[in-house]
Image (cartoon, rainbow, N blue to C red):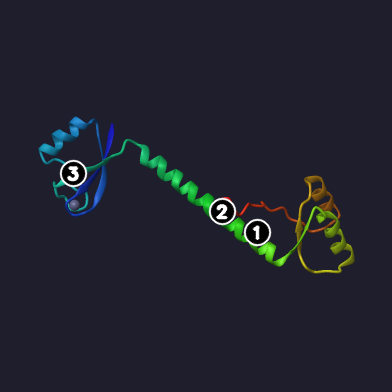
Amino acid sequence: MIKYNLICECGKSFESWFSNSLEYEKLKKRNFINCIHCNSPSVKKSIMAPNLPVKSNKDKKKKLVEKNIKKQLINFRRYIEKNCKDVGDNFPQEARNIHYDKKSSKGIYGKATPEETAELIEEGIEVSTVPWIKKSEN
Ligand SMILES: [Zn+2]
């Protein structure tokens, strides 16, 4: 089986399957191939497309979704950087200070190992782990 993208004189295109290119030529000669939109026999092959476009379309969509997620994560990162204080490796300590002393209501962000994060959560300190995306990655 072979798939052809056919384009009609009406300007619209559609896909059609043929058992092989010879079958297409035969049908074409007899004007048996008609536009699905206007029924005109004045159609011609545009691009030969054996299965591939479907896959690349999917890939494109997947890439687009990934790009959107990345964009959201970058925006999220920007938001945190703008509204919270970077305490770097001191994060677990700073988080405790805020939790126990209630000195500052300002959010903080920084680094913590999974163990440190688990300890904080155990202590009832509200922390969330966010995927930290590099802004240069595009
Ligand atoms: Zn047409």
Q: Which of these two is toward me, 6 or 86?
A: 86
- Where residue 77 is drawn, which disc sits there? 1
Between tags 1 and 2, which lies in front? 1
Task: Indicate which disc, 2 or 3, sits on the residue closer to the N terminus.
Answer: 3
Task: Indicate which disc, 1 or 2, sits on the residue closer to the N terminus.
Answer: 2
As drawn, 120 above or below 53 = below
Q: Which residue is mark 2?
A: 69
Task: Indicate which disc, 3 or 1, sits on the residue closer to the N terminus.
Answer: 3
Q: Secondary structure at mark 2?
A: helix
Q: Amino acid at mark 2?
A: Ile
Gap between marks 3 and 1, in whole Å?
A: 51 Å
| Residue for point 70% across, 67% down | 83
Q: Secondary structure at mark 3?
A: strand
- Residue 106 pos. (x, y %): 78, 68
How many marks do you count on the picture? 3
Binning the other alpha carbons within 10 Å of mark 1 as few (below 14), some (14 to 19) or many (20 upward) gives: some
Q: Quadrant of residue 24?
A: top left
Gap between marks 2 and 3, in whole Å?
A: 40 Å
- Residue 70 pos. (x, y %): 57, 53
| Residue for point 63% across, 52% down | 134
Q: Amino acid at mark 3?
A: Lys
Asked whether disc 1 touches disc 2, contact meaning CB atoms under 8 Å apart, the reply is no
As drawn, 73 above or below 26 = below
Q: Which residue is mark 3?
A: 44
| Residue for point 23% across, 30% down | 20
